[in-house]
């Protein structure tokens, strides 16, 4: 195992130690212990920058289950390194923030940091996995860990609702994604992402390619909160603010973005991929901005703003995937610029959105509310938080000199380039217009956050506590992020060659570094993009001033909750009602009904198999000779079995039942299966003794009335089961017309001595080949015995002998 593997797994290892370390740090916030993990990991991954900036990649592999083609393949290139730095860097800042945000006397911090480290490790696993199924394992682990973090305050109903909602939606997407991965494996016979990319042109011709793409996109869309699967994100805001700042600005919601970027070289060869990303991204971008305007909770506004910004990144990925569909180098460079913009905005969004979430957490922490209906006039009381808000909101709104302005201008350039080239016929003007309208919405909800929170009159009666600025410890992390917002705005080329360009090269491997190298500048002259930005500011400010008018006149602006939330709730309620109906239909409390269900299932499976493969052809000419005394024993066995259902006396019934078992033992002995004969004889003896011992405790025998219909059903099921068993036995000695059933006994005969080290094949099967089954069977029998004794004792009462 390489150091890279250990780095990926280290958060899990540290998480295991937290329940024990907390007892040694009773007087110290355990967050200080956890903080070292992301800091060390950030430095570890940062050392790869110099190597990966040249276009190289790092790969290490550990075999896990070779027979199933499962191996832990760690692959680090520009894209994986960018996300690893975001995960660890933001993780360190969030943990530092949480140390001052969460009170160690009131919160179960050991649980919180265990969940957080589990999530961090799972995210690192996603962005460094080259094996699709290993990626899926980490993917679902992020789903589980995020649900635990969202529901951390489980005593709040909204927290558990948000956790359950995010779990259901993202697990649905995860299952869909796994199905897509399996379809790719069926066609390519590999789970390696890099190997699949190398086979992309061959895979395109497969009928499974488009279904696989759609299923994978379902997983990515649910994770990255794309319309209409975005509804889990606003309810996830019930999580503690450090969770929102980490999961919903830089990590979890970006996992879907990562997957789309990683698989763009594979699926980008089809027009469908580009159109799906572009259309869903535009819809999400616009709807997120509109929905944010309708909210009154600060975190809800940021949640919908995150949805909108994620849609923007998906739009850029959709445009950039066109690089694989054009042939001229000029066109490739134009579309590759969209991928460059997506990566730059991804970094920018992590900085200003992380800072804004932390500032909103500070406001909530110091005032006790996040409602803009109560807030106002905090500028004088919380000047540092106000300044940080101005920086973050200006960056998100696209105002210079902050980093968001650069990526927004580049976004406009990419949209206008599409119109100029006329690739999307008929949409040359619509796509840039939709992007511009969404930008107006972005400016509008940024204005709502700032003016409704920090300006106006301060009303102390609206707050349950004395409002003041946050302590310096809580301000450090948002100050660092705000500083990055300003630095990356003034010096946009700071990380271009070391981080951004290698990332773009990972997504567009057919290009080289020279073709994607770009020099950015804060001022790029007076052009159409700048005019669009000025129009956004002017119209956005005008709409903010007129917003009360629109809210009073149109009910649309007063509805904070989308119809999609109601649809989800009704669907879950309907699913619950349906599941109860099905459960009540099956769980009748009758042992007979349960036996009928199981036997009907067996009859159906066996019947369909023989009907489908026509696998029985009796060849009596090849049947072995059966001595007359064996036939006599079989007749006794058959007559005894048929007599049992008609007996009215229990003693007689037990004796005949023993006769059946004795007959089976004799047949085993005659055909040289001494072990089976002895086992059967022992079991029959013990069973009869137990039945006789418990006989006197049974109530008097009363014939049970059954209708002719029920008797007919019982008879039909019995005959069908008998016929099915006969057909299974007959198939072992015959060959079908289409499919040959090789007897499994050949395998045991050939391998019993070599693999099991024994000449008694039956014993080897039980204690070697089926050792785990045998162990569990013994365990189950023991548990059943204990359960029976417990029930009997409970019924008898104390002091009575069982």
Image: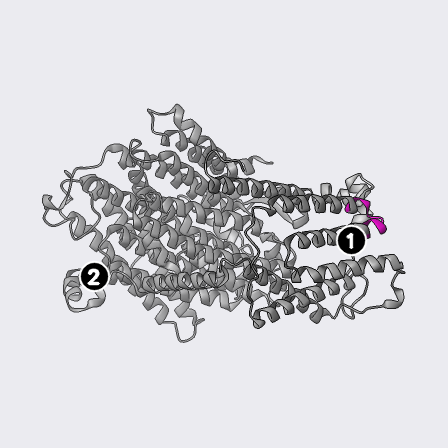
Where 545 falls versus 106 (above or below)? Answer: below
The local crowd at label 1, few if under 14, some if 14 to 19, many if 20 or more residues have their Cα within 10 Å, is many
Instruction: Tell me where residue 781 appears, x and y as whole percent.
Output: 61, 43
Count of labels in the image: 2
Q: Is residue 691 left or right of residue 298?
A: right
Instruction: Tell me where residue 272 appears, x and y as whole percent.
Output: 50, 68
Q: Is residue 351 visible?
A: no
Q: Which residues are magenta?
A: 667-676
Q: Is residue 263 visible?
A: yes
Q: Is residue 717 left or right of residue 215?
A: right
Q: Is residue 555 left or right of residue 86?
A: left
**Tag 2 residue:** 538
Q: Residue at x 30, y 51 (%)?
A: 158
742 is within the stretch colored magenta = no
**Quarter of the view holding residue 612:** bottom right
Instruction: Tell me where residue 726 appears, x and y as whole percent.
Output: 74, 64
**Helix, strand or loop: magenta stretch:** helix
Does dot 2 land on a helix, a strand or a loop? Answer: helix
Does dot 1 land on a helix, a strand or a loop? Answer: helix
Instruction: Give the colouring mode of the picture.
Output: one colour
Mark number, residue 663: 1
Quadrant in the picture for the C terminus: top right
As measured in the structure, the alpha-carbon distance from the residue carrying label 2 to the one carrying label 1 is: 96 Å
Instruction: Tell me where residue 455 appears, x and y as whole percent.
Output: 14, 49
The foreground one among 184 and 200 is: 184
Quadrant in the picture for the N terminus: top right
The foreground one among 581 and 298 is: 581
């Amino acid at each position: 195992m390489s150091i890279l593997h250990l780095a990926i797994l280290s958060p899990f290892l540290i998480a295991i130690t937290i329940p024990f370390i907390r007892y040694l740090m009773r007087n110290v916030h355990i967050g200080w212990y956890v903080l070292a993990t992301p800091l060390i990991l950030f430095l570890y991954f940062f050392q790869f920058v110099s190597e990966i900036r040249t276009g190289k990649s790092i790969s290490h592999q550990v075999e896990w289950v070779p027979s199933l083609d499962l191996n832990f393949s760690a692959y680090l290139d520009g894209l994986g390194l960018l996300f690893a730095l975001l995960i660890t860097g933001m993780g360190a800042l969030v943990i530092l923030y949480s140390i001052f945000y969460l009170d160690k006397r009131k919160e179960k911090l050991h649980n919180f940091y265990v969940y957080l480290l589990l999530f961090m490790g799972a995210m690192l696993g996603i962005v460094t996995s080259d094996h699709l199924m290993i990626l899926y394992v980490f993917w679902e682990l992020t789903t589980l860990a995020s649900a635990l973090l969202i529901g951390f305050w489980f005593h709040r109903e909204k927290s558990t609702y948000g956790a359950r909602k995010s779990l259901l939606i993202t697990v649905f997407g995860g299952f869909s994604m796994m199905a897509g991965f399996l379809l790719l494996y069926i066609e390519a016979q590999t789970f390696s992402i890099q190997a699949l990319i190398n086979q992309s042109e061959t895979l395109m011709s497969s009928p499974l390619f488009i279904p696989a793409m759609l299923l994978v996109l379902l997983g990515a869309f649910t994770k990255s909160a794309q319309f209409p699967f975005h509804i889990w994100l606003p309810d996830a805001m019930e999580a503690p603010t450090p969770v929102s700042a980490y999961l919903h600005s830089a990590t979890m919601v970006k996992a879907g973005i990562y997957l789309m970027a990683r698989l763009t070289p594979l699926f980008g060869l089809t027009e469908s991929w580009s159109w799906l990303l572009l259309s869903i991204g535009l819809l999400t971008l616009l709807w997120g901005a509109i929905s944010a305007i309708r909210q009154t909770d600060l975190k809800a506004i940021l949640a919908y703003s995150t949805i909108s910004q994620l849609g923007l990144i998906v739009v850029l990925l959709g445009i950039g995937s066109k690089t694989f569909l054009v042939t001229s180098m000029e066109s490739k460079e134009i579309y590759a610029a969209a991928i460059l913009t997506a990566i730059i905005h991804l970094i920018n969004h992590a900085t200003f959105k992380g800072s804004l979430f932390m500032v909103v957490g500070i406001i909530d922490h110091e005032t006790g509310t996040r409602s803009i209906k109560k807030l106002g006039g905090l500028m004088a009381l919380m000047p540092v938080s106000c300044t940080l808000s101005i920086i973050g909101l200006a960056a998100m709104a696209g105002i210079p000199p902050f980093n968001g302005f650069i990526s927004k201008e580049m976004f406009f350039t990419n949209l206008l380039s599409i119109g100029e080239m006329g690739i999307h016929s008929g949409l040359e003007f619509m796509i840039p217009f939709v992007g511009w309208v969404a930008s107006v919405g972005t400016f509008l909800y940024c204005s709502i956050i700032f003016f409704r929170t920090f300006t106006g009159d301060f009303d102390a009666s609206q707050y349950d506590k004395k409002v003041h600025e946050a302590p310096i410890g809580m301000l450090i992390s948002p100050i660092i992020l705000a500083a990055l917002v300003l630095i990356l705005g003034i010096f946009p080329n700071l990380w271009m060659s070391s981080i951004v360009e290698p990332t773009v090269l990972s997504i567009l491997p057919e290009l080289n570094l020279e073709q994607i190298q770009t020099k950015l500048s804060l001022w790029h002259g007076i052009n159409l993009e700048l005019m669009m930005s000025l129009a956004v500011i002017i119209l956005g400010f005008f709409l903010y001033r007129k917003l009360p008018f629109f809210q009073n006149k149109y009910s649309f602006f007063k509805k904070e909750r989308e119809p999609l939330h109601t649809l989800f709730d009704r669907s879950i309620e309907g699913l619950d009602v349906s599941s109860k109906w099905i459960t009540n239909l099956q769980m009748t409390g009758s042992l007979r009904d349960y036996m009928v269900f199981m036997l009907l299932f067996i009859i159906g499976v066996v019947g369909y198999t023989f009907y489908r493969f026509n696998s029985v052809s009796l060849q009596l000419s090849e049947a072995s000779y059966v001595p007359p005394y064996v036939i006599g024993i079989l007749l006794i066995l058959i007559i005894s079995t048929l007599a049992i259902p008609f007996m009215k006396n229990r003693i007689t019934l037990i004796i005949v039942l023993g006769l059946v078992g004795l007959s089976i033992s004799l047949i085993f002995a005659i055909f040289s299966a001494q072990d089976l004969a002895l086992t059967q004889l022992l079991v029959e003896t013990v069973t009869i003794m137990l039945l006789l011992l418990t006989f006197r405790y049974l109530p008097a025998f009363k014939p049970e009335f059954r209708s002719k219909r029920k008797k007919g059903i019982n008879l039909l099921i019995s005959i069908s089961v008998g016929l099915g068993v006969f057909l299974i036995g007959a198939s072992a000695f015959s060959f079908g017309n289409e499919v040959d059933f090789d007897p499994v006994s050949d395998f045991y005969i050939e391998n019993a001595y070599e693999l099991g080290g024994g000449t008694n094949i039956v014993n080897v099967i039980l204690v070697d080949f089926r050792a785990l089954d045998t162990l569990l069977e013994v365990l189950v029998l023991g548990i059943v015995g204990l359960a029976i004794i417990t029930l009997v004792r409970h019924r008898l009462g104390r002091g009575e002998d069982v």
